[in-house]
Image: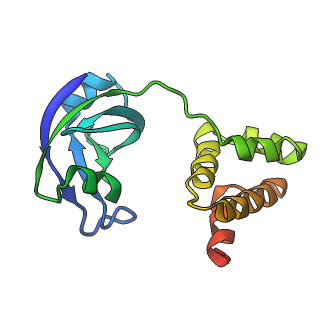
Amino acid sequence: MVLFSVTIHKFEKQGEKSGWTYIEIPADIAKQLKPGNKKSFRVKGKLDNYVFERVALIPMGDGSFIMPINGKIRKAIQKHPGSLVRVSMEVDKRERTLSKDLMACLSEDPEALAFFRSLPKYHQNYFSVWIDGAKTTQTKTKRIVIAINALSKKQGFREVLRAYKDNPY
C-alpha cells in the first residue's frame, strides 16, 4: 500500500486523452506498486474517503502513470482540477470476470465463442465492460446482439463500436 497526496489535473490537448481529468502517479511510487512494470495495471484503494477498485493506471512513458478520474469519482470526492487529494492504493490482483450474459449468448454460437476466446484478454474485457456498462436492459440486449454478430464475422471491438456508433438505438 502506498500513501501520498497529489493534485488533480486535466488534459487540455493530449490526443485521445483531451479533456480527461486525472492524477499522476510518479515513477517512484509506481515502482513501489509494481517494480519494473511499464504496462497498464489495475489498482484499488481510496481517494480521500472514496473507495475505488479495478481502476487502470495508464503508463506515460517516463515511468510515471496516470489514473483517470471520471465524473462519478469527481462528484463523490467533490473535487476538481487543481484540488489536492489524499491517495492510498495497492495493486488490485483480482481477475476481471466476463459478462455472464455475453458468455451465455456466446455459448450458443461456437464459432463466435472460439473467435472471442482467441482475442487477447484485454479485448475480451472491452466487450464485457461495454456490455455490462449499459444502463438499461434494452441497451444491454442490443449491445450483446451487436457483439455476437461482429464476433461471428471475426470482427473485433473496434468494428463493434463502429457498428454501435452508426446505430446506437
- The vertical placement of 37 against 152, above or below, is above
Q: Position of residue 153 (x, y in %)?
A: 83, 58
Residue 99: tell me if it is visible. Answer: yes
The residue lying at 64 percent from left, 38 percent from top is: 98
Seen in the image, is 29 located left or right of residue 125?
left
Q: Nearest the camera: 130 or 120?
A: 130
| Structure colour scheme | rainbow
Seen in the image, is 72 located left or right of residue 113?
left
Q: Position of residue 132 (x, y in %)?
A: 60, 50
Q: Nearest the camera: 128 or 38?
A: 128
Q: Position of residue 46 (x, y in %)?
A: 26, 35
Q: Quadrant of the C terminus?
A: bottom right
Seen in the image, is 143 located left or right of residue 71?
right
- The vertical placement of 2 against 164, above or below, is above
Q: Quadrant of residue 122?
A: top right
Q: Position of residue 108 (x, y in %)?
A: 89, 45
Q: Quadrant of the N terminus?
A: top left
The residue lying at 88 percent from left, 47 percent from top is: 109
